[in-house]
Each structure stands twice: as structure tokens, then as C-alpha cells.
Amino acid sequence: MKYQKLVDVYEAIAATTKRLEKTAILAEFFKEVDEETLPEVVLMSLGTVFPPWSEEEQGLADKLLMKAIANVVGVSVSNVEDQVREQGDIGGAAEKLYNKKAQTTFFSKPLEIDFVFTNLRKLAKISGDRSTSRKIAIVLELLSSATGTEAKYIARTIIEELRIGVGEGIVRDAISQAFDVEKSIADRAHMLTNDLGLVARVAKEEGEEGLKKLNLSPGKPVKPMLAQLSDGIEVSIEEMGEAICETKYDGIRTQIHKKGDEINLFTRRLENISKAIPEMINYIRNAFPDEDFIAEGEIIATKDNKPISFQYMLQRVRRKYNIEKAIEDVPLKLYLFDLLYFKKPMIDEPLAMRRKALEEIVDTSSEQINLSTMLKARPENIQDAEDLFNESIAEGHEGIMIKNPKEPYIPGIRGKKMLKFKAEPETLDVVVVGGTYGVGKRANFIGSYKVALQDDNEQLKTVAHVATGLDDETLAELTELMNKYKIVSKGTKIEVEPRIILEIAYSEIVKSPEYEAGYSLRFPVVKRIREDKGLRDIDTVDRLKSMFKG
Ligand code: ATP
């Protein structure tokens, strides 16, 4: 099938802001696509060519992409940069430049969807010697066969920002509409496999019956179940009637998958971090029976047996060299709290059962592998839960989790089944969309960061400028990242791709017409960089509104 067809669909979807219309357009298109191409089209409609848990990325810097565009249209790189500044994105700039040159046709043979998909995937496989020029060669081949609109979307797929306002929710609805399957059945299949390409294909080939057979499988991570804020230990326990209270550890949420001999560890963004912490794999292997399983826990870094900064954990999982030294310097510990699969899927069992099974199979005799500290609380013994909270804070942890023991595990939801109660006031996760260089001593650093939340349609809305809370080291690190993701610069201001997630604290939420969210934050302070979170994990304008005390 021709890539131009997919591009026409992108354009039609981008032209409407209405969710139902977007869904209908996509559904019609899904019906037309054959089985083989369908999974590719599904990923590409989400602006990517990799499944969410893939370790692969295309790894082509924006600068190189601009260079390739300049080369194909025969203008200078600074010309492309000017266009990017005007259009606000590389894709838009490419289209404009192609159209200016409309008289000359660049394309020889029309692009096929499969050809574009396969070549974009190839980018990730290239490494080592001359990798840059080999990557450029692929991009040049694609771009020189493209029309203006095709070039726009090829560029946007490379930077994984399609800008057509389509997220997983719309794609899921479109699958259910296209193949006439119950939405709840498609949702469940997605939740359990985390693979919309597969869901679409099974829906097309086998309908609801096929979808119902899809289930969790070790090796394929699922989105973790998330927690809501508790309004207070007492009210939460009273509401649940009976609760499992556990220490809330401040490390990295980890989903552990054992399939055959292989053990893999995934973060909440489904990143595979097994290579960065090989020692943990060994500890886990020794502590579990030799069966396939999926378990969850929090990995924390310790020094003299005390938990240390979460930021350290992040550095550890990013590290590619000197891993041996890091293993020696800062020991890691795992605190397990859930079991999703053991011999069979377990998520439909109530938490109390899953926890019991976990306790039965895990050997906690080593220092590194532990079960989370927990107790059962009822309205009669609230004091025990409060003691657990105080102990947790005294030991340097974050607070407690309050969980409903009767509830199943539902991947990807943030519900009342699991609550968190922390000592610190609530923070917001935001994405950086721009920044301003400092003055004087800080002229080489980006000192102020323009940050945004997402609205219902997954569109970004600016909400504040944050300039405090950063030490010199973090400032240097952030400045480097900002340059890596830079789209355009103007004087001391730059705009960046929305990739960097910050957790910020603030004193108060205020109404503000100056920001797209309609609200802003007083005295925002950066608490930390959240590399364990992605764009879809940031907070929403709705949440901000609900927290506004007006
Ligand atoms: P936060 O910023 O509060 O860590 P979050 O947005 O990262 O929140 P939430 O789901 O809101 O994630 O909070 C729950 C997180 O707390 C889990 O994702 C997990 O990483 C962590 N955690 C620590 N200890 C536990 C525990 N005993 N049970 C469940 N989660 C735990």
C-alpha cells in the first residue's frame, strides 16, 4: 500500500479536533489495510515504528535530519533552520521547502508503507563505524522519493512527534470500530499485551474470540498499575474497610520478567534496564524458583544500609561503562510487592492472594531481595498504619502505600485500588518545551525552563517557567539535554522537543491567562528530573484544575 494513502489519513485526522471524527477516519483506513501491513500502520499512526517496550530508537539527531532535508531540497542548513523556526517543527519546515520547489519532482517511484516502515526501523540497527553516514543515506533515500507531505510525516516519525492529536485511546477505539469488536474487549487485550499492532491484527483475523484469548505473557512488559493520592491514612483505611499498608520506597518501579532462562527488568516506561544492573538479575535468579513469572517491586540504592537519592538510581540505570565499580560502590536492594504471573496469569486474583503467593515463592534470605514491609490495617488499628508511616519516614523512605487487598491488578490504570500517602506536599510532573539562557556567570546554562502539562487530547499546554531548585551539576546536565533536543533558538531563548520530564513543587496554583493551561504555579521549584517517566506520564490540565483551591 502506498505511503501517500497513510499520509492522506494523517492530514485528514490533523484537520479535525473532534475525537470521534479522528477515530472514524482511522477506523475506515484500518479496514482497508491488509493483515501484514496493519500492525505497521497501527504503530505509525502513533508516530513510531517500535512497540512501546522496545529498546530500539532511531537515534537520529535533529541536526542530521535538517542536514538531510537541506541536501534533498538543495538549500543550506541555515535555510532549513529558518523554516523550522517559522513553522515550529521540522516536519512542517520540510513540507514548506519541498513545496517551494514544486516544479522539480524529487520522487522517482512512489513510496510504499512497508518500505518506509522497514527503513525507519533500520535506523535503529545501525551502530559503530560510519553509523552517521549510513543513517543519513537511509534518510536521504526516503526523503528523495517523498512528496512534500510525505517528507513532513517521515521527518515527524523520525522524531516521534506526529502532531495529529492521536494517542493510544483513539487507536484502540478505531480498532474496535473497524473490526466491530466490543470496546471493552479491545481495551482488555491492549492492557494485557501492550501491543496495539497485535490487537488490531487479531481483531481483524479472529474477532472478539481471538482477542479474549490474548493474555499476559512473561517477557512482554505491561503498563504498571498506578496509585492515587490518599486523603489521609485514617479515611483511606476506613473507606477500604481493610487495607494492606506497605512502606513506600523511593527508587525505581521495576517489572521483573522471567521467561525460560532469561530475566529482564523493565521500568514503568517499559524500558529494559537489565544490562545496567546485572547484579540484580543474579540476585533475582537465586531468590525465585525456576519457573516463568512476572513480579513487581521497587529497586533502591543504598549506602551504609540507608536509602540514598532516587537520582542515583537513575544514573545507575543509564550507565553503560564502569558498571563493576558502580556495583561495588552503591549496593542495590529490591523490595517486592506484587506477583502478576506465576505459572499462569495472576492479575485477576485479589491482592491478598497475590501477596501470599509471592511470600511463598521468594527466598528473602539474601540482603538484596526483600518483600516490602507490610501490615494489615483495619479501622480498629489505624495506629499501626500511622506507626508504619512514621517508621518509613524515619528510615529515609517516602511514606506508605495503602492498598485494597480484595482488588485485582489492572495494568495501566490509576485508581482507588492503590493509594499513596507521602510526607511531602504533592508535586507535578511536567514536560520542558523551552528555555532561556542565564546571564553573567550562568550565561552558558539554560537557567529558566518553560514547562507544560497535557490536556484531554494529549496536546501540550504551557503552565509555568521554572528557574529554581537546580544545582550546578543538574543545570549542566539539563542544558546538555536541552541542546540535544533543540528545535529552534532565538536570541537567548530556545524551544525543544517535549522529551525532558521534570517533577516540580510549588507553593500555590493560580489562574493565569499568560499560560495556555489557563493556570500557573507560584514559586515553582524543580525537585528532580524524571527520566523514568515519558511524555504520556505527565500530569494533566484537568488534574491541575481539580487541585486549584480558587
Ligand atoms: P511518585 O511520584 O509518588 O513516586 P509516581 O507517579 O511515580 O508517584 P505512583 O503510581 O503515583 O507513581 O506512586 C506509586 C509508585 O510508588 C509506584 O509506581 C512505585 O514506583 C512506588 N512504590 C514504592 N513502594 C511501593 C510499594 N510498596 N508498593 C507499590 N508501589 C511502590
Image (cartoon, rainbow, N blue to C red):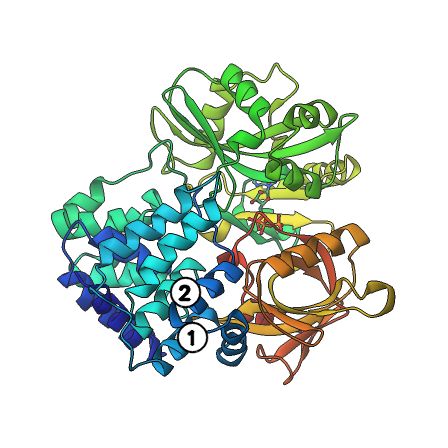
Q: What's the residue type where badge 1 is placed?
A: Gly
Displayed quadrant of residue 222:
top left
In the picture, the quarter occupied by the N terminus is bottom left
Up-down: is 233 above or below 394? below
Q: Which residue is more in the foreground, 411 or 40? A: 40
Q: Earlier in the sequence, mark 1 or mark 2?
A: 1
Q: Residue 198 placed where, x, y %?
A: 25, 46
Residue topped by disc 1 = 92
Q: Residue at x 72, y 39 (%)?
A: 397
Q: Residue 420 placed where, x, y %?
A: 61, 48
How many tags in the picture?
2
Q: What's the residue type where badge 2 is placed?
A: Arg
For label 1, the crowd category at 10 Å Cα-Cα, with few meaning under 14, some 14 to 19 and many 20 or more, is: many
Displayed quadrant of residue 315:
top right
Q: Which residue is more in the foreground, 69 or 335? A: 69
Looking at the image, residue 249 sits to the left or right of residue 159; the answer is right
Q: Which mark is residue 156?
A: 2
Which residue is at the far right?
A: 441
For label 2, the crowd category at 10 Å Cα-Cα, with few meaning under 14, some 14 to 19 and many 20 or more, is: many
